[in-house]
Amino acid sequence: MANDEFAGRTALVTGGASGIGLATARLLAARGARVAVLDRVKPDFGDDDALRPVLADVTDDEAVRAAVGAAAEALGTGGLDVLVNNAGTGAAGTVEDNDDAEWHLVYDVNVVGIVRTTRAALPLLRAAAARHGQAAVVNTCSVAGIAGLPRRALYSATKGAVYALTLAMAADHVAEHIRVNCVTPGTADTPWVARLLDAAPDPVAERAALNARQPMGRLVTAEEVAAAIAYLASPLASATTGTALAVDGGMAGLRTRPR
Ligand SMILES: NC(=O)c1ccc[n+]([C@@H]2O[C@H](COP(=O)([O-])OP(=O)(O)OC[C@H]3O[C@@H](n4cnc5c(N)ncnc54)[C@H](O)[C@@H]3O)[C@@H](O)[C@H]2O)c1
């Protein structure tokens, strides 16, 4: 059955050059949306010219404002139905391991980056809500924001902030018919995790440990996270705001015995 629930809608996905963001941009486009992708690197979409790239680092407010404006122009409606705040960066260690500069940098990308992009997009989201009755923001949070993982103090703190920000934004904009939700992925098989595995002393053992940590016994895929983001972004989810949707192979909620 054709699924074109985003026909006539526009979307902007940050961090859309890779992994979860790229899978999300492709899925929204496949379901009928006109999609722009904001990333700090120029994406390689191959022949997939349905996605319109705009370049910006989410730590640069001026660049974000310019890129959001350029995306709206490329999409050509004067509004934005969907904003996916997905750009993010990682950090490893306990509270002893990351210096102040790293704390500020990771917060700047993962938390203030969402603030900058949403702030720039809000007039466009309001315009879309006026035209279509609703608009949607979906933030990429993480299981690390709601469950304690070892050696992820800084990263987890930023994702906990993303969860709190999601709820606050949902409350602020509910009367404007702008829904705000987030996804909480478990460990997902993306280029990010591939880089982490490559850097591990024993990548095979590390992958096995990450698989075993998730009750399903495997990593989740970028496409599985994209499907959850698309659900929350969809006009069909019109009564859903202020929620966190887990896509974590059961990691946060289940207490299974080791296999
Ligand atoms: N992969 C996982 O296991 C996992 C689990 C939970 C949550 N997440 C979250 O999912 C999101 C995407 O991660 P991914 O695994 O797809 O990673 P990825 O590295 O494959 O993609 C991240 C993208 O974000 C872009 N980006 C990073 N910093 C940026 C910045 N300052 N400005 C603009 N763009 C920037 C990168 O260029 C890249 O294209 C992140 O927010 C991450 O925290 C990932």
Image: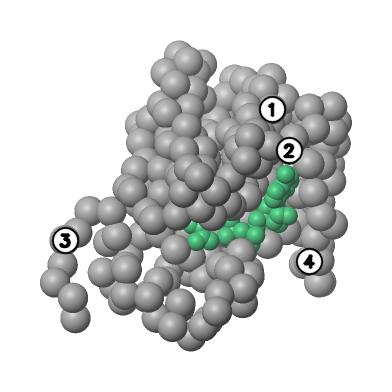
Residue at the disc numbered 3 = 255
| Dot placed on the residue nearer the N-terminal end, 1 or 4 | 4
**Distance between mark 1 and mark 4 Cα atoms:** 25 Å
Lateral position of residue 246 relative to residue 85, left or right: left
Q: Residue at x 52, y 70 (%)?
A: 189
Picture coordinates of residue 165, whole percent (x, y): 48, 27
Q: Is residue 13 above or below residue 82?
A: below
Residue at the disc numbered 2 = 58
Q: What amino acid is found at the position of numbered circle 4 in the picture? A: Phe
Q: Residues within 10 Å of mark 3 (few under 14, many from 20)?
A: few
Q: Residues within 10 Å of mark 2 (few under 14, many from 20)?
A: many
Q: What amino acid is found at the position of numbered circle 2 in the picture? A: Val
Q: Do tag 2 and tag 1 residues touch (Cβ < 8 Å)?
A: yes
Helix, strand or loop status at disc 3? loop
Q: Residue at x 78, y 27 (%)?
A: 61
Q: Residues within 10 Å of mark 1 (few under 14, many from 20)?
A: many
Q: Is residue 87 above or below residue 69?
A: below
Q: Is residue 251 visible?
A: yes
Q: Nearer the viewer, residue 234 or 60?
A: 60
Disc marking residue 45:
4
**Distance between mark 2 and mark 1 Cα atoms:** 7 Å
| Dot placed on the residue nearer the N-terminal end, 1 or 3 | 1
Residue at the disc numbered 1 = 116
| Dot placed on the residue nearer the N-terminal end, 2 or 1 | 2
| Dot placed on the residue nearer the N-terminal end, 2 or 3 | 2
Picture coordinates of residue 159, whole percent (x, y): 48, 41
Q: What amino acid is found at the position of numbered circle 3 in the picture? A: Arg
Q: State which image quarter holds ligand 1.
A: bottom right
**Distance between mark 4 and mark 3 Cα atoms:** 40 Å
**Distance between mark 4 and mark 2 Cα atoms:** 20 Å
Picture coordinates of residue 149, whole percent (x, y): 37, 54
Asked whether mark 2 lies closer than 8 Å to ligand 1, one says yes
